[in-house]
C-alpha cells in the first residue's frame, strides 16, 4: 500500500521482497475490510474490480445451537491472494487472473521496481540516508541507498530486528486450525447459512469463525467461492500436545506453522474425532470437508518505537504491531498507517504527531485483539486483567489527547 501511495505521488520506489517467487500464493487466507482500507482502494485501486464479499451482519452460534443470536456488525471480507494481486496490479502492473490487463501508469507516477528473492541483511545510516544491504537467492550481495525506508515485513520483521527495536513478542497459548472448502463441496443449506455474513460458533474455551471468500482468481460467482474457517484451540507453550500438532508428515517439528499438505492426517483426524461433535452443524460440515488444513501458532508483537534514524526509517503494519487475528484488523491497520503517513508528507501532521498517534493506535488494537482472543479461548480472570489493562491505557490516551 505504501508503495502504491508513493508511486501515485511521484516518488520512485524499490520494493524488496524476500519470497523468491515473483507472485505470492495467498494460501486461501481471509482478510477483513474496514473504512481505511475501503478509502485506500477507492482512491488508489485503478482496476475497480470487485474486491470483497459484503456482510450485512455477524451471526453467532453457541455450541450446537446454530442460530443463537445476530449482531449488526458489518465486516466485509476478502482473500489475501486477491488483495495481493490488486496491489501488485497497481504497483508494478503485474497481470493475474483477476486483473489480466492491469491499469497503466498515470502521468506523474514515480518509477517502481519489485525485486523478488531479496532478503535484507544490513542497515546503516549516515547524513540523512539509509543504506539497505540485501542478499539474493543466488547468494549475491547488494545494497541500495534511500532517504526513506519503510519496514513492512510482518511479525518476524528483519528490519525491526536490525534496528534493535524494543519489542514485546509472545505466543498467545493457542493455535488456529485453518482451511478452505469449495462451496460446491457442502450442502446448499450450509452455503446459505454463511451467505452475506460472518459467523462464529462459541464453544467451551475455543471457537470457530467461518465466512465466504473468493479464490486467488478473484471470482465472486456462486459455486466458485470458498468457505474459509479458523478454529482457535488452546495448546500451552512447551506442551507435548503443541509439539504433536506442530510435527509434520516428515516428523519435522515446526516453530510456528505447519503448511497445508504437511499436517499429519492422523493429527487432524484425532482432533475432529474428539471435538467435531460439539460444533453446530453448518460449521461441522465445512470443517469435515476440509482436505488440506494448516495450523499456526497465534502470536502477537508490539514495537516500542515507530521511527528510527531521525525519522528516515519507519515500521508499519505487522512489523510495528502484529495483532491477534480475532478482530481481522491487520490490513485495516496497514491502510491507516499509509493514509496517515501521507498527511505527514503533505504537511497536515508533523512526524512526531504521526509517531505518537500511530503507536497509541497500534497498542490499542493490540490490546483489543488480545482481549477478544482471551474472551473466546481463555478464562474469566485473564479476561478481567486484559480489560483492566485496556481501560488504563485508554485513560492514558485521553490524558495525552490522542
Image (cartoon, rainbow, N blue to C red):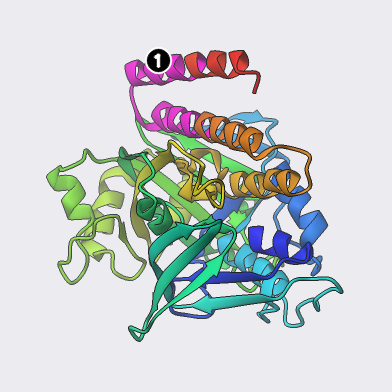
Side (left or right) of 177 relative to 38: left
Badge 1, how many Cα within 10 Å: few under 14, some, many 20+? some
Give how far across and how far down residue 130 sits, in percent: 50, 61
Above or below for 123 versus 210? below
Give how far across and how far down residue 100 sits, in percent: 72, 82
Residue at 48% of width from left, 14% of height from top?
392
Side (left or right) of 211 relative to 206: right
| Residue 380 on the magenta span | yes
Residue at 12% of width from left, 46% of height from top?
240
Mainly helix, strand or loop, the magenta region? Answer: helix
Closest to the observer, 215 or 383 = 383
Closest to the observer, 326 or 162 = 162
State the quadrant of the C terminus.
top right
Above or below for 264 versus 198? below
Side (left or right) of 249 relative to 313: left
State the quadrant of the N terminus.
bottom right
Above or below for 155 versus 363? below
Closest to the observer, 189 or 289 = 289
The residues colored magenta run 365-391
Give how far across and how far down residue 181 sits, in percent: 50, 63
For this orientation, the residue located farthest to the front is 127
Residue at 58% of width from left, 52% of height from top?
31
For this orientation, the residue located farthest to the left is 240
Could one spot residue 112 in this view of the protein?
Answer: yes
SS at mark 1 in the image = helix
Number of on-image labels:
1
Closest to the observer, 259 or 287 = 259
Residue at 71% of width from left, 75% of height from top?
111
Q: Which residue is mark 1?
A: 384
Could one spot residue 223 in this view of the protein?
Answer: no
| Residue 91 on the magenta span | no
Amino acid at each position: 500500500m505504501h508503495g502504491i501511495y508513493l508511486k501515485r505521488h511521484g516518488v520512485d520506489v524499490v520494493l524488496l521482497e524476500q519470497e523468491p517467487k515473483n507472485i505470492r500464493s495467498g494460501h486461501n487466507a481471509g482478510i477483513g475490510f474496514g473504512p481505511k482500507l475501503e478509502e485506500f482502494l477507492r482512491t488508489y485501486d485503478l482496476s475497480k474490480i470487485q474486491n470483497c464479499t459484503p456482510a450485512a451482519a455477524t451471526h453467532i452460534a453457541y455450541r450446537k445451537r446454530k442460530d443463537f443470536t445476530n449482531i449488526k456488525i458489518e465486516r466485509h471480507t476478502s482473500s489475501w491472494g486477491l488483495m495481493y494481486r490488486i496491489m501488485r496490479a497497481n504497483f508494478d502492473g503485474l497481470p493475474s487472473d483477476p486483473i489480466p490487463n492491469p491499469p497503466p501508469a498515470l502521468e506523474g507516477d514515480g518509477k517502481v521496481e519489485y525485486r523478488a528473492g531479496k532478503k535484507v541483511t544490513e542497515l546503516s545510516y549516515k547524513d540523512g540516508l539509509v543504506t539497505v544491504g540485501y542478499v539474493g537467492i543466488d547468494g549475491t550481495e547488494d545494497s541500495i541507498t534511500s532517504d526513506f525506508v519503510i519496514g513492512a515485513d510482518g511479525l518476524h520483521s528483519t528490519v525491526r530486528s536490525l534496528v534493535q527495536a524494543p519489542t514485546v513478542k509472545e505466543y498467545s497459548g493457542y493455535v488456529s486450525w485453518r482451511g478452505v472448502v469449495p462451496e460446491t463441496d457442502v450442502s446448499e443449506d450450509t452455503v446459505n447459512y454463511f451467505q452475506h455474513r460472518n459467523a462464529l460458533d462459541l464453544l467451551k474455551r475455543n471457537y470457530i469463525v467461518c465466512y465466504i471468500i473468493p479464490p486467488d482468481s478473484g471470482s465472486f460467482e456462486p459455486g466458485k467461492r470458498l468457505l474459509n474457517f479458523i478454529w482457535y484451540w488452546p495448546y500451552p507453550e512447551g506442551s507435548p500436545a503443541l509439539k504433536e500438532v506442530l510435527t509434520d508428515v516428515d516428523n519435522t517439528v515446526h516453530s510456528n506453522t505447519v503448511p497445508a499438505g504437511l499436517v499429519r492426517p492422523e493429527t487432524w483426524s484425532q482432533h475432529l474425532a474428539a471435538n467435531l461433535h460439539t460444533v453446530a452443524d453448518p460449521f461441522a460440515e465445512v470443517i469435515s470437508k476440509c482436505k488440506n488444513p494448516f495450523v499456526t501458532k497465534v502470536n502477537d508483537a508490539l514495537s516500542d518505537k515507530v521511527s528510527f534514524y531521525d525519522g528516515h526509517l519507519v515500521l508499519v503494519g505487522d512489523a510495528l504491531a502484529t495483532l491477534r487475528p480475532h478482530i481481522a484488523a491487520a490490513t485495516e491497520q496497514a491502510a491507516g498507517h499509509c493514509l496517515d503517513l501521507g498527511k505527514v508528507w503533505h504537511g497536515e501532521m508533523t512526524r512526531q504527531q504521526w509517531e505518537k498517534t500511530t503507536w497509541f493506535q497500534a497498542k490499542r488494537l493490540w490490546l483489543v485483539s488480545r482481549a477478544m482472543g482471551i474472551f473466546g479461548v481463555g478464562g474469566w480472570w485473564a479476561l478481567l486483567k486484559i480489560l483492566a489493562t485496556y481501560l488504563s491505557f485508554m485513560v492514558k490516551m485521553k490524558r495525552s489527547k490522542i
